[in-house]
Amino acid sequence: MTGSRRVVRRRLGFAGTLLATLFFCASMTPSLLPRAWEYQGVMGAVTAIIGYGTGASAGAVCRAVIPYRPPARWVRWAWQIMLGVCAALTVAALSYSYGWQRDLRALMGMDTEITWYPAVILAVAAVLFCVFLVLARLVRLGGRRLIDWLDRYVPNLVGHAVGGLAVALLVVVFFNDVLLSGFVAAMNNVSSVANETTPPGVRRPAEAALSGSPASLVEWDRLGREGQVFTGDALSRRALETFSGRPAEQPIRVYVGLEAAPTPAARAELAVRELERTGAFQRPVLAVLGTTGTGWVDPGICEALEYMYNGDTALVAVQYSYLPSWVSFLVDQERAAVAGRALFEAVRARWERLPADARPLLLVGGESLGSYAMENAFDGVDDLVARTDGALFVGSPYANAIWYDVTSRRDPGSPVWRPVYESGKVVRFAQRPADLAGEPRPQVVYLQNSSDPVVWWTPRLIFERPTWLEEPRAPGINRQMNWFPLVTFWQVLGDMTAGLGVPAGHGHRYGALIVDGWAAVAAPPGWTAEDSARLRVRISGG
């Protein structure tokens, strides 16, 4: 029992304490987006425990390979100096953190008067750090007891190897099959219940051109929550006519919920039949849209195109998950890819049966995980260009294969945050309307804010400095942001939770820029820059 207490209650290690402090201080530095003080406390604890584990492991290795042990007096002096340095660094980081957050908010045009409690941040981080440390030491204690038991029956070397491997496997299984799976199952249960509810103010449409209507092949209750928003909040003829000043068509919106059919292929086939029922293949424009994890489609992507064509459009989307996008991105990427490919292939197969001179423009689009879903319908940028009439992808994740390929093969001299691919003849990247001006008009447009964590987050941030932090740095990225091994990975991951809490043009907010994206890819005949300007005001809520 005494040995057990010694493992759990032992004093902190030198290297672990040093790196825990350095990691905590690094977590206080600015990242892509502003953060709240509560979140900073949690982030500080997470990065500190990672730093402690890294330092403790490095110290153990050094002690195992270096037999020399310094005198106790030297160790005491080293501790005193190290603790003094750590205290000074912590005070400095906490003091500067308030200014860093204000500078970041000012960069994004946000209110700089914020609530920030350095002492409370430190207290929250310290308490959580202690909890994490005790849990880690309990795991270590269990491993020691297992090894001691094995050593009774097998040689020590074998017992230590088997015991260490067993503990490692148990930890992996626990995190993967218990914590992660349990979390995903809980999120799925909560999300599935939410999926069955109709949002306040959303009503079943009466127009036959909308899925879920009395004439639809897809029942209203089978659309799911986001599908009901997609069709129930569709633009009316009156709204379109107010903008255009002439008679408008009722836009066609087709949506198939996760519960409407058992497989991705079946949902895609049902979507095609619904498109046929509504007369979608007779419209001038047919857009196949990817959805996020919950089935959400950005209203701006839909409405901008519908306003441009005065309602004479058809949009189609399918749901593949209940989970929020950030959870789906971690565990449901394959489902998104399969759903996107199944839908596009089914729609295109029916589109190809039309006479060549009677086919509508075939467009694809999506935001965030929705862009990932649609990109996966194609084998590369050449295939995307060959089999569509245009594509608009908004806030594409780093995992998007076509986005990554085009960005990696950008023209020399163009920065990664605004890459130029083959002189912008076919593919264009934009954060401002001016980025899409000029000829020739692109066929593929990527809208990406330089401070969007969805675009930049990748596991490579753990050990690799990202090119978007090199010079020249994008105007929207804080000049004081730096890369720290392990720490920046968690900072940017956490930034994704704040991606929508900033003004348009920053983070994961794209607003009216979507108008310019569609205008560059598929503007109707006679559409002018003045029309785009008016529509930007309308989409922005003006």
Image: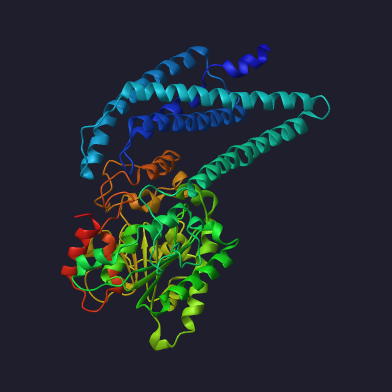
Question: In the rendering, at what x and y percent does residue 194 appear?
Answer: 48, 45
Figure quadrant of residue 285: bottom left
Is the N terminus in the top left, top right, bottom left or bottom right quadrant? top right
Question: In the rendering, at what x and y percent does residue 197 appear?
Answer: 46, 47
- Nearer the observer, 392 or 312: 312
Say whether residue 148 is left or right of residue 75.
Answer: right
Question: In the rendering, at what x and y percent does residue 174 appear?
Answer: 63, 36
Q: Residue at x 37, y 23 (%)?
A: 122
157 to 211, vertically: above or below: above
Instruction: Evaluate whether residue 416 shows in this view.
Output: no
Q: Residue at x 77, y 33 (%)?
A: 158
Is the C terminus in the top left, top right, bottom left or bottom right quadrant? bottom left
What is the count of numbered marks?
0
The residue lying furthest to the left in this view is 530
411 to 61, vertically: above or below: below
Instruction: Name the image colouring.
Output: rainbow
- Nearer the observer, 423 or 430: 430
Say whether residue 246 is left or right of residue 225.
Answer: left
Q: Residue at x 59, y 62 (%)?
A: 263
Figure quadrant of residue 493: top left
- Nearer the observer, 327 or 58: 327
The residue lying furthest to the right in this view is 153
Question: In the rendering, at what x and y percent does residue 266 appear?
Answer: 58, 66
Q: Residue at x 43, y 49 (%)?
A: 198
Instruction: Evaluate whether residue 107 shows in this view.
Output: yes
Say whether residue 479 is left or right of residue 491.
Answer: left
379 to 13, vertically: above or below: below
